[in-house]
Amino acid sequence: MSQHHPITHHPITLGTTLYSFTNEFHARQASLEDLIRETDRRGLGPALEVVGFQSFRSFPDVSDAEADRFKAVLAETSLYANCLGINADRFMHPGTPISDDEMVEFHLRQIAAAAKLGFKCVRYQNTATPGVIRRCVDLAEKLGVKLGLEIHAPHSANHPDIVKYRTMYDEVGSDLLGFIPDFGATAHAVPDLHLNYFRNVVGAPETAIQKALEIWHDDAIEPFQRFGALMQWAGKNGVEDRHAVELMIIYGIINRMEPESWAEIMPQCFHIHGKFYDVDPATGKEAAIDYDRTMKVFLDNGFSGTISGEWEGHMVDDGSGFARVEAWHAMMRNILGAGA
């Protein structure tokens, strides 16, 4: 068992999502059990987050054998099952979206699996409408599993789509309904990891990269309209579709909302995705997301819950996530102080 023993009186508990180690997982360098043990060995807990379909072969129902094996590995460590990422795939049948009834049934199975595995909450996605989630509350109440909508770029806390969930939450009045802010929604720069990828791997023209950045910084363009704006410009300027499509990734993973906007939903936040791309070991800072400013919003507004380090650089970088997550934890301990 890990010798790291975090002080637990701090209202914010650190953790890690194994999604950060997608490169290790996809390269078959490590199994789920290996990743759990290594996360613990490096002191990257105690709150553990995993993605259901990435981590469990029998998901979304989860066999007794797989659930028992997962719990047994956790019992070897100082980690605990905190958040399970579940999916809301509308097009499980190619070309034909599934009905709301099918979506409800799909979510009920995943919520039951979360409880069976011992998770305290699930992260659900906005392709599950407020009406679908409303119909899942009874099971969540029965099993004691919190349902958290991930607010992910290009959405923001006050986007009309999110306001519909806030309204439904007010109507239902369950303490198990809440939000999971993703810090990529309140970034202030495009990560260098992505710019290097666009230049050195994709081979996109520099003019196209600069145009993509210009659109990303343009507050006159609504976040969901940036995709089309770039494609339209690319078509008029002879940029290949394959390059434009690669560049558009920045609009779907990072947004420029002010960190203070999280305060609006703070009472209903119980978990955070601590999205990051590159913490500079020399400065201890994340270059694309202002963690000092963002965490101040959560601390000043009394947030009490968990935050998972989530390295998403694997989308454009084949390197290991472990050292990067270690740097994130060091940054967070510095921000939170001795209590972390």
Image: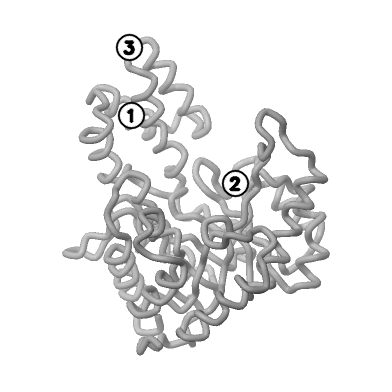
**Which residue is more in the foreground, 201 or 221?**
201
Q: Can you give x and y, in whole percent of width and height, for residue 246 in the image?
A: 37, 31
List the residue tagged with mark 3.
Answer: 237
Which comes before the other along the chain, label 1 or label 2? 2
- Tell me the residue at 55%/75% (across/down): 70
Q: Secondary structure at mark 3?
A: loop
Amino acid type at circle 2 is Asn
Q: Residues within 10 Å of mark 2 (few under 14, many from 20)?
A: some
Q: CA distance from mark 1 to mark 3?
A: 15 Å
Tags 3 and 2 touching, CB below 8 Å: no
Q: Residues within 10 Å of mark 3 (few under 14, many from 20)?
A: few
List the residue tagged with mark 1.
Answer: 214
Q: Can you give x and y, in whole percent of width and height, for residue 280 in the image?
A: 22, 60
Amino acid type at circle 3 is Asn
Residue 158 is labelled as 2
Q: CA distance from mark 3 to mark 2?
A: 35 Å
- From the viewer's perspective, tell me whether residue 7 is left or right of residue 80: left
Residue 236 is labelled as none
Q: Can you give x and y, in whole percent of width and height, for residue 101 in the image?
A: 82, 45
**Residue 235 to residue 266: above or below:** above
Which comes before the other along the chain, label 1 or label 3? 1
**Residue 281 to residue 163: above or below:** below
Q: Quadrant of residue 319?
A: bottom left
